[in-house]
């Protein structure tokens, strides 16, 4: 159960190491937890392994280290964690995920070569904690979540209503904005609604960048950034600027364009318990069916929220 505890530690840290990944770690000796921790904030904050090893002290010798992501094997803003693991005398390492960073990965192989018993216990729960960072370092673009609010018959508007979904769902969306590096819509939505796209009524560490994909001009006084280029090129430029995650709130045309280009990583479909009977559907048409690799659903107020990953993080 110690890997589960490491996952809990990273979850409780709540992305505090951003823009670095947040890693949880637990040291177990003689069936007892002797040290634990999670990645510290700041560019030079210690990785979770180092926090746990420091907590364990001499009790780390011949112990087992459980960690949500394999120890890094390169010198970045901090020294390689593999060196600290070897210096502490750890006998066994169990990792919940591999490091997708081509510069830092290979930690388990480095430890194995040094005589440490290593095991990869690949966990979706461990990978999803740093899902945006993983896509950012692996693919050179932000992790894209397409958020949709729709009726039971798939319409994005309901006659006589300002909002499709309920208040609880809308509050959750503001929380998603607060947790995202950028929020985006298309120019059609800009012209029709002039959305603000900021996070309101929820705790906010920093407001997301607010983007409009498509041809301008933007309305006078708009606080949005116009991104007029090809989607792939714009996402690449955003990634180079440090944007790891984009919450796509655009209408069906923009959402479908992202889906057709294979640029949506996760779909969040908020479904309201109403039949609209008319209006535009939330997807315009695809070349072929898209089958999520995993999906789940939950209730938020009166609405249902379906979360579907189109690729593994």
Image (cartoon, rainbow, N blue to C red):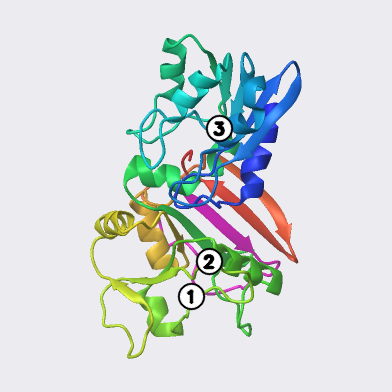
Q: Check whether the beta carbons of the residues at disc 2 and disc 1 lie within 8 A of each other.
A: yes
Instruction: First in sequence, mark 2 or 1: give its number.
Output: 2
Query: Mark 3 sits on what residue?
Result: 49
Is 165 covered by the magenta stretch? no
Magenta: main secondary structure equals loop
**188 versus 263 height, above or below:** below
Foreground residue, 304 or 69?
Answer: 69
Residue at screen point 24% across, 57% down: 233
Relative to 136, 305 lies left or right = right
| Mark 3 or 1, nearer chain start | 3
Residue holding disc 2: 177
Residue 296 spot, x, y in % from top left: 64, 46
Q: Residue at x 56, y 56 (%)?
A: 268
Residue that badge 1 annotates? 197
**Which numbered mark, 3 or 1, is in the foreground of this view?**
3
Dot 1 alpha-carbon crowd within 10 angstroms: few under 14, some 14 to 19, many 20 or more = many
Q: Is residue 221 left or right of residue 97?
A: left
How far is mark 2 from mark 3, CA to CA? 30 Å
Q: Which residues are magenta?
A: 265-286
Pick the front one: 8 or 121 = 8
Residue count near mark 2 (Cα–Cα under 10 Å), binned few <14, some 14–19, many ≥20:
many
- In this orientation, which residue lies closer to the viewer: 99 or 261? 99
Task: Using residue 222 as the reference point, say whether residue 159 is left or right of it.
Answer: right
Indicate the position of residue 174 as horizontal and vertical percent values: 59, 70
């Amino acid at each position: 159960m110690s890997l589960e505890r490491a996952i809990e530690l990273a979850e409780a840290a709540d992305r505090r190491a951003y823009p670095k990944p947040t890693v949880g770690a637990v040291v177990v000796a003689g069936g007892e937890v002797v040290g634990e921790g999670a990645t510290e904030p700041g560019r030079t904050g210690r990785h979770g392994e180092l926090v746990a090893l420091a907590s364990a002290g001499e009790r780390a010798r011949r112990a087992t280290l459980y960690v949500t992501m394999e120890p890094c094997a390169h010198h970045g803003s901090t020294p390689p964690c593999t060196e600290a693991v070897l210096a502490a005398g750890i006998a066994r390492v169990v990792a919940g995920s591999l490091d997708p960073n081509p510069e830092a990965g290979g930690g388990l192989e480095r430890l194995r070569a040094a005589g440490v018993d290593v095991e990869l216990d690949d966990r979706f729960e461990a990978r999803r904690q740093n899902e945006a960072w993983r896509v950012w370092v692996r693919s050179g673009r932000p992790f894209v979540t397409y958020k949709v609010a729709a009726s039971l018959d798939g319409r994005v508007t309901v006659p006589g209503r300002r909002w499709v979904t309920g208040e609880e769902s809308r509050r959750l969306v503001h929380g998603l904005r607060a947790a995202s590096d950028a929020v985006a819509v298309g120019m059609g939505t800009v012209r029709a609604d002039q959305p603000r796209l900021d996070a309101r009524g929820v705790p906010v560490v920093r407001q997301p960048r607010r983007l409009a994909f498509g041809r301008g001009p933007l309305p006078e006084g708009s606080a949005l950034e116009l991104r007029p280029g090809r989607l792939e090129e714009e996402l690449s430029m955003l990634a180079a600027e440090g944007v790891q995650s984009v919450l796509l709130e655009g209408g069906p045309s923009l959402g479908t364009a992202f889906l057709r280009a294979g640029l949506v990583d996760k779909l969040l479909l908020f479904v309201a318990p109403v039949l609209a009977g008319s209006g535009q559907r939330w997807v315009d048409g695809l070349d072929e069916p898209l089958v999520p690799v995993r999906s789940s659903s939950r209730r938020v107020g009166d609405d249902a929220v379906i979360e579907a990953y189109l690729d593994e993080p």
